[in-house]
Amino acid sequence: MSSNHSNIEEAVNRAESFFTEWLDDEDLVYNLVLLTSEAVTNGMEHGNQFDESKRVFIEFVVCDSRIEISVEDQGPGFTREQVPDPLSDAKLFADGGRGLFLLESIADEVNYENEGRKTRVIFHRNSAHSSSD
């Protein structure tokens, strides 16, 4: 989808519809939708600079062992180590900068691929997030 604000809501709606269809755990669905919103916002805002000629590609996977959200933008990419810690004194009261921290705090695993243009958020089905526990 193109990188504009209205498409963030569209991505959230698609995530909610998809995960509600495949999963019974409302708390897990909420977290998946929240992290989809964060990852898509990061891709559109920081990756593509809300350039509507650039797209964000989103993929959802639910299988026996894991659940994945992949978001890839067409921006220049980034290096995770260069993103400031939002809990540092200098950033603690900043308006933004907590998206990656949120992804990494809630998901079981977060991978940054394709030089930072692709974010893969993973929940392991046998973890505490699973509704079968």
Image (spheres, rainbow, N blue to C red):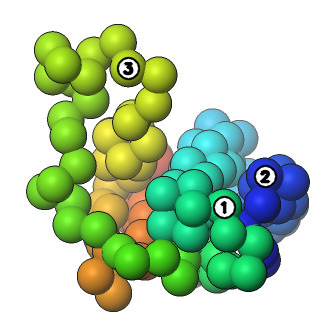
Q: Earlier in the sequence, mark 1 or mark 2?
A: 2
Res 118 visible: yes
Q: Could you tell me residue 30's position as x and y percent?
A: 67, 41
Q: Which of marks 3 and 1 is nearer the N terminus?
A: 1
Say the numbered circle drawn on residue 5. Answer: 2
* Circles 3, 1 touching at the beta carbon (< 8 Å): no
Distance in Å between CA atoms under marks 2 and 3: 21 Å
Residue 36: quadrant of the picture: bottom right
Q: Could you tell me residue 76's position as x and y percent?
A: 39, 77
Q: Tag 2: Cα neighbours inside 10 Å, few (<14), some, or many (≥20)?
A: few
Q: Mark 3 points at which residue?
A: 94
Say the numbered circle drawn on residue 50. Answer: 1
Res 106 visible: no
* Circles 2, 3 touching at the beta carbon (< 8 Å): no
Number of labelled discs? Answer: 3
Residue 11 vertical placement versus 115 (above, below): above
Q: Tag 3: Cα neighbours inside 10 Å, few (<14), some, or many (≥20)?
A: few
| Side of 47 where 124 appears, left or right | left
Task: Give the amino acid at mark 3.
Answer: Ala
Q: Tag 1: Cα neighbours inside 10 Å, few (<14), some, or many (≥20)?
A: some
Task: Give the amino acid at mark 2.
Answer: His
Distance in Å between CA atoms under marks 1 and 2: 8 Å
At x 49%, y 67%, the residue is 47
Distance in Å between CA atoms under marks 3 and 1: 21 Å
At x 57%, y 62%, the residue is 49
* Circles 1, 2 touching at the beta carbon (< 8 Å): yes
